[in-house]
Image (spheres, rainbow, N blue to C red):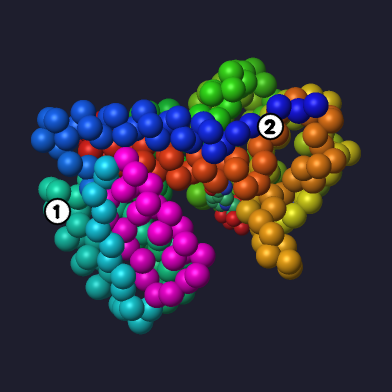
Amino acid sequence: MAVIIDGREVAKKIKEELKEKVNELKEKGIYPKLAVIMIGKDKASEIYVRNKSRDCDYVGIEYEEFFLEESITMETLLNLIDELNKRDDIHGILLQSPIPEHLDIRKAFNKIDYRKDVDGFNPINVGKLLIGEDTFIPCTPLGVIKLLEQYNIQIEGKNAVVIGRSNIVGKPLSQYLLNKDATVTVCHSKTKNLKEITSKADILISAVGKPKVITRDMVKENAVIIDVGINRTPDGKIVGDVDYDNLLDKVSYITPVPGGVGQMTRAMLINNIIKAAEGK
Ligand code: NAP
């Protein structure tokens, strides 16, 4: 039977360690603070933002929210980011996505000072990840690697297959795995013979966003399965990308959804805010 990777437990442990770090910073007169920008109304984003504020409260990080009207101009958004870049009391800036279509999210990410870019989406930080320099790794990829490390799952030399090539999950995760000396294959919607590739994976990571896209016949015996996907079923349940129940007796490790990667993503945001406040 597979070991169920308990993201909730690992995230809890990490948050306790991070709480200590916040206290140490405060003793030095540094009060870590996050600015969150949210534009318009989006149910899912509202939940994410609420969770982020709870996490900040829990570890003692200060928090300032900027709720902007859906109709704002790009200029207003860029001016706000500029102002936050200049404020010494703000260490991290987070722009909650999605943002309305008339706004250019890339331009906005480019504007966030790379030293306050706790999401790791600014091209300077993306480039640093590519060349293997210390940087802000996007929260979900960082959370996945931390989970593997907490369970002492070897990455070096392993065949890692990542399904999904988004800028926020698939691409940075593939690069980070490569930096950790895995042999990495990236798959996407145009990949031919997906099953042939996934069945060779020692570590299989799905970041697709479709339920049961990974089935029993697609995985190798004793593989490690990391499910990044978050999908809502018609009856309102949250499920991942993986046919979880049918994989349990075939694989060595597996993450549940919920209770896996999602919890780690949240903890890694706290990690990155502290990193920004430390000026590292
Ligand atoms: P995305 O931007 O929609 O990317 C999905 C990727 O999956 C794309 O690269 C797409 O290929 C690929 N794909 C789609 N259908 C496929 C198929 N049948 N076979 C192989 N590849 C396929 O999504 P995302 O933002 O990366 O997020 C992915 C999932 O992770 C979503 O469910 C999201 O909710 C979840 N997520 C979870 C967390 C967390 O903390 N757990 C964080 C972020 C996201 P193309 O590039 O060719 O279109």
Measure the C-alpha gap from mark 2 to mark 1.
44 Å
The magenta segment is 34-59
The label shown at residue 86 is 1
Above or below, comparing residue 189 to residue 265 in the picture: below
* Left or right, 142 with reference to 79: right
| Label 2 sits on residue | 4
Cβ of mark 1 under 8 A from ligand 1:
no
Is residue 27 shown to the viewer in this render?
A: yes
Report x, y in % for residue 238. Answer: 66, 56
- Give yes or no for residue 56 being in the magenta stretch: yes
Q: Secondary structure at mark 1?
A: helix
> What secondary structure characterizes most of the magenta part?
helix
Report x, y in % for residue 24. Answer: 21, 28
The three-letter amino acid code for the residue at tag 2 is Ile
* Left or right, 180 with reference to 207: left
Q: Residue at x 31, y 34 (%)?
A: 19
